[in-house]
Image (cartoon, rainbow, N blue to C red):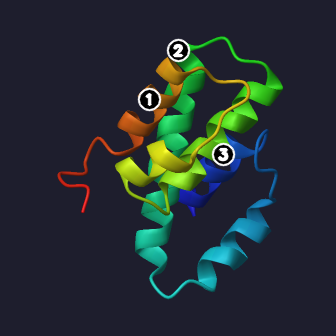
Amino acid sequence: MDNIRYIQRSLREVHPLTYEKWEDGFRRDLNVENEIEAWMHCSRCYNNFVARNALNSAEKKEAFHILAVCMNSTPTTAKEIIVTKMINQKYLDQLIDAYFVFTSSDE
């Protein structure tokens, strides 16, 4: 429950779901623990990025979108498919690298 609250609070500005919607979504997952951990990692990456950079609302939404793509791809694929409008290449690379910090291999 604490993890779901952390995710909900962290992402409410860019992915505004209620606690109940988050919980319901996780209950529907086949591997709840892995899915919660993936969203926790996404939330931590998002929080760290936002804390280090002065971002407006649109930039925050784009940062979240980048991390959401990372959740379902590899580092190479993410770098190939993500197109940004607000976040420059340096920050894009930082976000992708931060998300995949624990990934030892692309393939």
Residue 22 on image: x %, y %: 70, 66
Q: CA distance from mark 3 to mark 1?
A: 14 Å
Name which of mark 2 and mark 1 comes first in the sequence. 2
Q: Which mark is residue 36?
A: none
Q: CA distance from mark 2 to mark 1?
A: 15 Å
Mark 1 crowd level (few <14, some 14–19, many ≥20, 10 Å Cα): some
Q: Which residue is mark 1?
A: 93
- Residue depicted at x 17% and y 51%: 104
Name which of mark 3 and mark 1 comes first in the sequence. 3
- Residue depicted at x 79% and y 38%: 13
Is disc 1 placed on a helix, strand or loop?
Answer: helix
The C terminus: image quadrant: bottom left
Q: Which residue is mark 2?
A: 52
Q: Which residue is mark 3?
A: 65
Q: CA distance from mark 3 to mark 2?
A: 18 Å
- Residue depicted at x 80% and y 29%: 58
